[in-house]
Amino acid sequence: MSLSTTLSDSQATSSQEPTTVEKLRGLPWSIFSNAANTVFAQFTFFGSVFVLFLSDLGMSKAQIGFLLSLLPFSGLVALFIAPAVARFGYKRTYITFFTLRKFITAGLLLTPWVLSRYGRETMVLYVTLIVAGFALARAVAETGVYPWIQEYIPNSVRGKYSATNSIYTTLTGLLAVGVAGFTLGYFSGLTGYMVLIAAGVFFGLLSAWAATFIPGGAPDRSPGRQASLMRDMLATLRDANFLRYLMGAALITLGTVPMGSFLPLFMQEQVGLAASHIVLIQSGTLVGTLLSSLAWGWAADRYGSKPVMISGLTLKLLLPVAWFLMPRHSPLSLPVALGIAVVVGISDIGWAIGAGRLLFVSVVPPDKKMAYMAVHYAWVGVVGGLSQLAGGWLLSLSANLQGQVAGFTLDPYTPLFALAFILLLGCLWLLLGMRADNVYGVGQFAGMFFRGNPFLAVNALVRYYAARDERAAVSVTERLGQAKSPLAVDELLTALRDPRFNVRFEAIISIARMPPEDRLIQALIDVLNGTELALGGVAAWALGRMGDPRAIEPLHAALDSPYHSIRAHAARALGALHDTSAVPILLARLPVEQDKGLQMAYASALGNIRAREALEPILKLMYATQNEGARLELALSVARITGDEHTFVQLVRQMRDDPGTAAAQALAAFRRRLQRLRSGPEAELAALEAAEGAFARGHLHEGAQRLAALLHQLPSTWFEEHGGQVLAECARRLEESGESRQEYLLLALHLLPLSLTPP
């Protein structure tokens, strides 16, 4: 199949925008095309190879800057050819001129012949014409490709596509850089450059062929389209958000492009690295891109473009400082340069994915994509060209700069690094005010990586999508909750909708471990109000455990649920939230409720809220309850209201191991406190010592009876009102039942020292 036949056929069937299925089917071809074009870019105009090639031809920095400026400057033609590109078709325009520029590039292979036959000046003119021709063809092609890209990549996967595309192009770039470094080290003179350029042209043509299989990009021949496009392009100048984006793009271009373009010469002249090592530094950039692409793409699709863009830009601020401070002519120079290059790759892809997604999703209206993209491409081209000229001009002005200031080395590249830092800082300030699609603010996004355990969260996220059965899914859902990281929120919400009951159940428990977050709270409320009763009660418990007051209103509503389990869990959850507004409702229902489970839930909730007016009905319920475990829970409610939960629970544990000793020690503590606070209670102390002795000897029944007598003997004025009320009840019940009702013994031993008041 020929290129022209493929192109003609595709255009004939592309009168309408392709379906999402067709778009997704074309994305692998797009990635393959970009990967092949990466080899072309690294071997020709867009890598260190080309700058070193021009330097070896004897060109000055100003000449190199001028040639590099032609590439972006040509973007200005987009303003004038946009209507024609729309009529001819975005896809047809791109592929035609994308292919043409490869043949123009092949002209560089004649450079050594031109140099040897016609001299240096003619050679410079010849290379300039090649670069200018390539730049013009590139500008026409990219005027068509940007609207086409907005069309054929679905917004729902734009971040994922960018990340996947970045991984494949980065891997290809790593291989290309390695080959370039080996080739330049193997061949001497210009031969190595010629080999690389020839290989680059071949891969460039392969890239153009692959692009023919991408759908969309049909011609737009609607009447009045040319006039409409011109009006739309003028209208872009009234779009404040678009203008802010353009200004930010200008600042980052002026700050980073000259620094990146002349960095190979800085490494060669000031750091002392060989040409083959300089090319290999690009591998560090590619490694950084490779390591972070998926994370950036995932974050952009999930949290929005702006946080990713700003994060990448913030990292870029570190780079001029890092290059300036790196060791010169040292064994450490190459390793440090490679390390910095890794950060370059991380920041570059973060910026590219965030800013690119922001442009296509939030900044450019889809129905005016040609007008906006033409203005954007022309503006970036002009700024990019100026940045190359400015970089060469600035280096010419500072050519003689050298010296030391406060131990720092100054050289001709120092002003370039300083300017980059200042412009990046200005770009950061400007773009923070962008209107975007982000779900979270920039500060919230950054904070996600400092809350909970982000490493455990990321590990769990990877395992979540790899889980192959229910057991694995339940296990990884548990780990998501253990991470307590906002990064796990979306997966927990997905697990809450899993068709497997146990996964949904575990998701609720895991959500309960998480910090309160709007979507998680609302998801639990939806489960509480839903029809799945087995999960509704657990959701109520989880809302109480999370401790967020937003759950109070729906939990109040759940108190009137027709299902006892929901009402019970809602009451306990309100108790856990210490909701005092629930006290009148619970207090009114407790004495009249017939269901034992609800009685226990109401009493427990009132105990958690520490509602002192609930003491009498809880004590009545405790006396009437037959279940030992339930009585102990009711005693805990009383302890919460009148004493201290922690010391009560400790006493319960001690009594289980050795009840006599634990009781004796508790009475000893009360005796010491009584002796400190009251002078001369000889009779009371004697009775206390008798009870203490009985318990110490293991005579629990005798000790309980003596303790009951002691409680009757102690004046009520010695104790706080509510403590005295409970102690009086304990005295009656111990006298009646002895040690068989251990909850009264526990309450008495617990409250005696706590309720005693100073005289």
Image: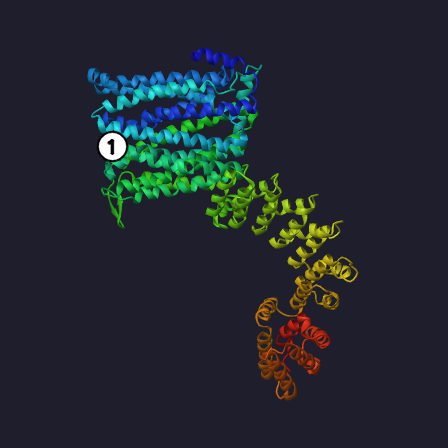
Q: In the rendered view of the protein, which quadrant contains the C terminus?
A: bottom right
What residue type is disc 1 on?
A: Ala
**Residue 269 percent location from the top left of the image:** 24, 36
Task: From the viewer's side, name the closer residue of 631 and 241.
Answer: 631
Q: Please, is residue 258 above or below residue 661 in the view?
A: above
Whether residue 575 is visible to the viewer of this picture, yes or no, is yes
**Residue 423 percent location from the top left of the image:** 40, 39
Whether residue 353 sits left or right of residue 281 in the image: it is right
**Residue 471 percent location from the top left of the image:** 55, 43
Badge 1 is on which residue? 275
Whether residue 528 is visible to the viewer of this picture, yes or no, is no
Q: Residue at x 71, y 51 (%)?
A: 566
Q: Please, is residue 82 above or below residue 277 in the view?
A: above
Whether residue 21 sits left or right of residue 69 in the image: it is right
Question: SS at mark 1?
Answer: helix
Q: Residue at x 37, y 26 (%)?
A: 38
Residue 722 figure quarter: bottom right
Task: From the viewer's side, name the closer residue of 173 and 273.
Answer: 173
Task: From the viewer's side, name the closer residue of 564 and 39.
Answer: 564
Q: Please, is residue 538 above or below residue 294 in the view?
A: below
Q: In the rendered view of the protein, which quadrant contains the N terminus?
A: top left
Count neighbours of disc 1 (C-alpha within 10 A) and say few if under 14, some if 14 to 19, many if 20 or more.
some
**Residue 91 percent location from the top left of the image:** 48, 18
Residue 590 figure quarter: bottom right
